[in-house]
């Protein structure tokens, strides 16, 4: 049976929800789960990708890249869900401790992070598809990953050009992600231990507030 909630009441409910999210003193449980799952996955991927690149050519290297690919595609799916959630539920308003250019810079860094969360896996996917031709592994043996038909009838030279471009993009994004993460984590710790404001406790509410 259809639920008879008038559309404007529905909208008012969502507006109230967004307003409550804005005025909370910490991120929502879902926001926190997204953040730390993604942070763990990305840190693992940075290390695992580097490790795979240093293995000698052989089965172990292939298996390492397959895991890297599957986790990368998981990052892509989680990032899309996270962006949708972030658009629906805004982050809590920053306190007076972070205002002006710092506020703008942190917002810009967050959106750059989201861009990298999409760009890194997509460039990896293109790289795998251009090199490996038709075969892409199913995700964790259960989710068939879409085949990119654009490479089917491509000449080897064009495929190589695509692979090289995707590899460069991936490489640049890895460094950007690595440096941005260092800076981001460094600022979070600086806020907590030096400025003693509640920036870090917004993302780890179990942490005692700095005194
Ligand atoms: C690869 C690792 C990481 C990525 C990709 C990442 C990404 C992000 C993103 C996108 C946000 C914004 C959330 C939003 O409002 O939309 C955020 C917020 C935050 N992150 Fe990270 N993060 C990472 C690691 C870390 C680490 C290691 C720390 C702590 C040492 C940290 C501390 C925080 C804090 C405190 C916030 C909330 C800032 C605020 O709005 O007040 N993050 N992070």
Image: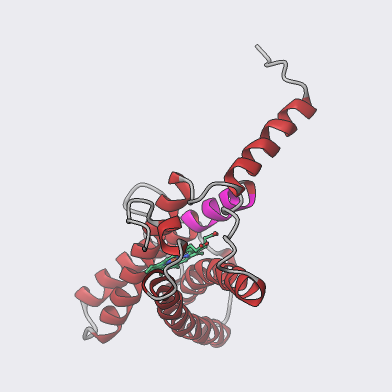
In the rendered image, residue 72, in percent from the top left (x then y), is placed at: 41, 65
Q: Residue furthest top?
A: 1
Considering the image in quadrants, where does the N terminus appear? Answer: top right
Lateral position of residue 1 relative to residue 202, left or right: right
Q: Residue furthest front?
A: 211
In the rendered image, residue 130, in percent from the top left (x then y), is placed at: 49, 76
**Which residue is painted at 59% across and 47% down in the image?**
23
Lateral position of residue 1 relative to residue 122, left or right: right
The quarter holding residue 106 reads bottom right
User: Can you see residue 72?
Assistant: yes
Q: How many marks?
A: 0
Lateral position of residue 176 relative to residue 84, left or right: left
Q: Is residue 178 magenta?
A: no
In the rendered image, residue 175, in percent from the top left (x then y), is placed at: 45, 85
Considering the image in quadrants, where does the C terminus appear? Answer: bottom left
**Which residue is painted at 32% across and 56% down in the image?**
207
Q: Nearer the viewer, residue 97 or 147?
A: 97
In the rendered image, residue 135, in percent from the top left (x then y), is placed at: 41, 64
> In terms of secondary structure, what is the magenta stretch mainly?
helix
**Which residue is painted at 47% across and 54% down in the image?**
78
Q: Is residue 81 magenta?
A: yes
Q: Nearer the viewer, residue 76 or 42?
A: 42
**Vertical placement of residue 42 versus 206, above or below:** below
User: Can you see residue 74?
Assistant: no
Lateral position of residue 100 relative to residue 142, left or right: right
Query: Magenta region: which residues?
Result: 78-87
The quarter holding residue 3 reads top right
Q: Nearer the viewer, residue 181 or 139?
A: 181
Q: Nearer the viewer, residue 55 or 21?
A: 21
Q: Give the colour scheme of this rendering.
A: secondary structure
């Amino acid at each position: 049976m259809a639920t008879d909630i008038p559309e404007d009441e529905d909208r008012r409910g969502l507006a109230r929800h967004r307003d409550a999210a804005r005025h909370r003193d910490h991120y929502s449980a879902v926001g926190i789960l997204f953040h730390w799952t993604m942070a763990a996955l990305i840190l693992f991927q940075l290390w695992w990708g580097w490790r795979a690149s240093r293995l000698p050519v052989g089965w172990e290297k292939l298996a390492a890249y397959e895991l890297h690919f599957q986790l990368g595609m998981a990052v892509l799916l989680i990032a899309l869900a996270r962006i949708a959630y972030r658009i629906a539920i805004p982050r809590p308003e920053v306190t007076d401790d972070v205002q002006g250019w710092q506020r703008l810079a942190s917002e810009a860094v967050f959106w750059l992070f989201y861009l990298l969360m999409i760009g890194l896996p997509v460039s990896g996917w293109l790289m795998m598809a251009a090199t490996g031709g038709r075969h892409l592994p199913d995700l964790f043996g259960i989710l068939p990953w879409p085949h990119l038909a654009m490479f089917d009838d491509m000449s080897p030279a064009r495929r190589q050009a695509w692979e090289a471009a995707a590899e460069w993009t991936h490489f640049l994004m890895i460094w950007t992600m690595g440096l941005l993460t260092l800076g981001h984590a460094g600022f979070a710790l600086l806020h907590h231990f030096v400025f003693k404001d509640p920036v870090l406790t917004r993302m780890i509410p179990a942490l005692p507030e700095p005194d």
